[in-house]
Amino acid sequence: MGTRFPIPEGTRLRVLSVSARIEVEAKDVQDMEIEPGGRRVEVSDDKHVVETRTRSTNLKITVPEGTSVSVGTVSGHVSLKGRFGTVKVSTVSAHIEVDEAEGDVDIRSISGHLEVERCGGRCRANTKSGRIEIGWVGKEVRAQTMSGGIEVGTAGQGDMELRSISGRIEVAVDPGRHPSTRLKTLSGKAESSLPPGSDFQIKARTISGSIRVEEG
Amino acid sequence: MTPAAAIETREGTIVFTDLSGFTEFTALRGDAAALSLLDLQERLVREQIGDSGRIVKNLGDGLMLWFDEAQDAVRVSIALQERFEEASGEDDEPLWVRIGIHFGSPVLRGDDFIGHDVNVAARIVDLAAPGEVLVSEACTAQIEAPLDGVVFEEIGPTIMKGIPEPVPLYRVMRSWDA
């Protein structure tokens, strides 16, 4: 049984962890619930931030849909299921999975894979060694990895800057949007199957990988 | 019991730069091209620093810099990223540099610095993306007046390996990019 308490609308959840698995689920509920129960929870003076910390105890947290979430961890999987507001996650070596954010997403890891199913705002994803998969993003994207591929689907409503040291970059653009492209690779093949346009810009660079832009 | 040696600390700002993809670039283009890329990075850094700071040491594919004033470190770092980007575009050189900044009181060891604050700065650059400048709250707290054309965007709580307390970090951006 977890600890349940009401949170005002607009509250941001902040979770700090060393090595625990952090699972946050956004559901059609009014209250926040943290499992296991009995954990210390701090609320900021302005009531805008609810913070909980764990060293190695895995946490499962349920929040109302649309809640904004920040997570900082060293290791341990970070999974955000459901529809959130804005999302910020930083980790040293964990994988990060995000279902959906209505707002901006900023996720970064030193050695973990990053996955975002859907981001309605701007999306930044950065990892040193891991792949990046962004299913669909509504606005600008900046995604960078040193050793891993990048796959991004875009609405074509914001510029894209993608960089990989040694990995393939693949971009799928919503039908009807025509980007201007600056694709640069030092040792691979760069190609776009879309007619050139000026709806938005795709800047993709890799040192040893190929780049492909196509309709998604 | 031997008395502890007196240590000299200095308050100021530590900056680490790290050239991404240097190993891959060297493998593809050879040692001469790699050396030229490092020289380009160092030349741009020297030009941009001027008298506001100094290069503490060369770390192979990165540099450690020192500034007495936090605002100088931030101003120089963001200007450097613009120059790196310009150079990458013009010369087809992947000058993809990550920059991390932290303010503290490291121990002076000759011309070098060591200690916890140096370690924190090194961890910060690890989390930065190529082309990005990340700065700790300890550094932004030193900047009293707003910097012209510069904004700080919080990136959320950050727990770093070996550093017991969370380190709040900010992305340094041009106001027109925010």
Image: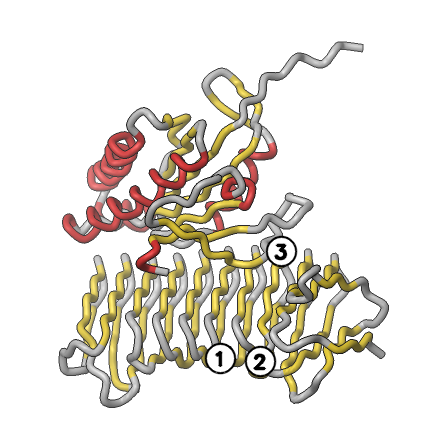
Label 3: few (<14), some (14–19) or many (≥20) C-alpha neighbours in 10 Å: many
Q: Earlier in the sequence, mark 1 or mark 3?
A: 3
Pointer 1 residue: A102
The residue at which mark 2 appears reads as: A66
Say which amino acid is labelled 1.
Glu
Q: Nearer the viewer, residue A192 or B143?
A: B143
Q: Amino acid at mark 3?
A: Val
Mark 1 or 3: the one toward you: 1
The subunit carrying tag 2 is A
- x and y percentages locating residue B176 in the rendered image: 31, 58
3 and 2 marks on the same chain: yes
Residue under mark 1: which chain is it in? A
Mark yes or no: residue A103 visible: yes
Write the residue at 21% across / 78% down: A199
A110 in relation to A89, above or below: above
x then y, percent, for residue A158: 30, 74
Q: What residue appears at the point 66 percent right and 73 percent down from the top-left corner?
A: A23
Q: Is residue B64 left or right of residue A68?
A: left
Tell me whether marks 1 and 3 sit on the same chain: yes
N-terminal of the pair, mark 1 or mark 2, is 2
The secondary element bearing badge 3 is classed as loop
How packed mark 2 is, by other alpha carbons closer than 10 Å (few <14, some 14-19, many 20 or more), is many
Identify the image quadrant of the C terminus of chain B: bottom left
Rounded to the nearest angstrom, the CA distance separating label 1 from label 2 is 7 Å
Q: Are marks 3 and 2 in contact (CB under 8 Å)?
A: no
Q: Quadrant of the N terminus of chain B?
A: top right
Whether labels 1 and 2 share one chain: yes
Q: Are marks 1 and 2 in contact (CB under 8 Å)?
A: yes
Q: Residue at x 75, y 61 (%)?
A: A42
- The mark nearer the N terminus, 3 or 2, is 2
Q: Residue at x 49, y 68 (%)?
A: A114
- B120 over A60 or under it: above or below: above
